[in-house]
Image: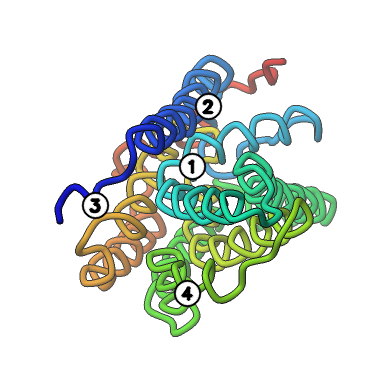
Amino acid sequence: MLERLELPAERRVSTAALVAGVLGVALAGWIVAIQRMDGMDMGPGTDLGSFSFFLGAWVTMMAAMMLPSALPMVLLFDRVGSAQRASGRDAASTGVFVLSYLAVWAAFGIASYGLYRGIQALDLGFIAWDREGPIVAGVAVAAAGLYELTPLKRVCLRHCRSPLHFVLGGWKPGTSGALAMGAEHGAWCAGCCWGLMVSLFALGVMSLTWMLVVAGVIFGQKVLPYGPRVQWAFSAALVGLGVWIAVDPGGVPWLVQPDMQPAMEMKT
């Protein structure tokens, strides 16, 4: 009985190779991010550089931060897709699904870059760090914390943690189907994590330390067994951090004070 429950040896090898591949891409993303972003953290309001530089850095960051937490969904998609192909049905490769998923996060980054440039063009002096900047950053982080307790967050997180109904009930065949499913899952994931990404921008989008912290929170929420049960703790921590930044930004560990850092040229 137990033997029939086990995956065939060929399937186990394929699954192991997929796990290694996804985690390998994530690891490569971290290595590239460390090489390109080391020493570039200028805290809240970090200059994003040229569009091409930011987009390349952002996609690399998303591969590093998001792929480990997306791995259960990737494995599920691959398993169902393999079953579809074995029965003679049309199913695209898992790679198409992953690329579509990352494309959603690339679109999120493009929108964020456009918003950043729009705010910059308005030349709002009050958001300077030596004026109301700490309050603005603190409010952004605290708002991200409050979002963690909203119904929309719960729905999106539930989908990310338990996507079986999505795959079995909404399976779409072929390459177009894999693209659509990857984009849809990416949209759910963005709905789950956009507040945390806002907090990353508020803390310093080029900060490797905060990038690691946010990635850890995302992984804990989406993968670890008790993630949803401690959602209130994540929320309280973000709200508390936001208040701390607004009241005493100099006392916040790992938070770079923008006006104390020399301007640095973006690496290429």
Residue 77 in picture, x, y percent from top left: 52, 54
Q: Closer to the N terminus: mark 3 or mark 1? A: 3
> Which one is closest to the eye, mark 4 or mark 3?
3
Pointer 3: what residue?
Answer: 4
**Residue type (three-letter) at the residue carrying disc 4:** His
Q: Closer to the N terminus: mark 4 or mark 3? A: 3
**Residue type (three-letter) at the residue carrying disc 3:** Arg
Q: Residue furthest left?
A: 2
Pointer 4: what residue?
Answer: 165
Q: Find residue 67 and name its label.
A: 1
Q: Which residue: 69% across, 18% down?
A: 265
**Residue type (three-letter) at the residue carrying disc 2:** Gly
> Which one is closest to the eye, mark 3 or mark 1?
3
**Residue type (three-letter) at the residue carrying disc 1:** Leu
Q: Residues within 10 Å of mark 2 (few under 14, many from 20)?
A: many
> Which one is closest to the eye, mark 2 or mark 1?
1
Q: CA distance from mark 3 to mark 1?
A: 31 Å
Q: Are marks 4 and 3 in contact (CB under 8 Å)?
A: no
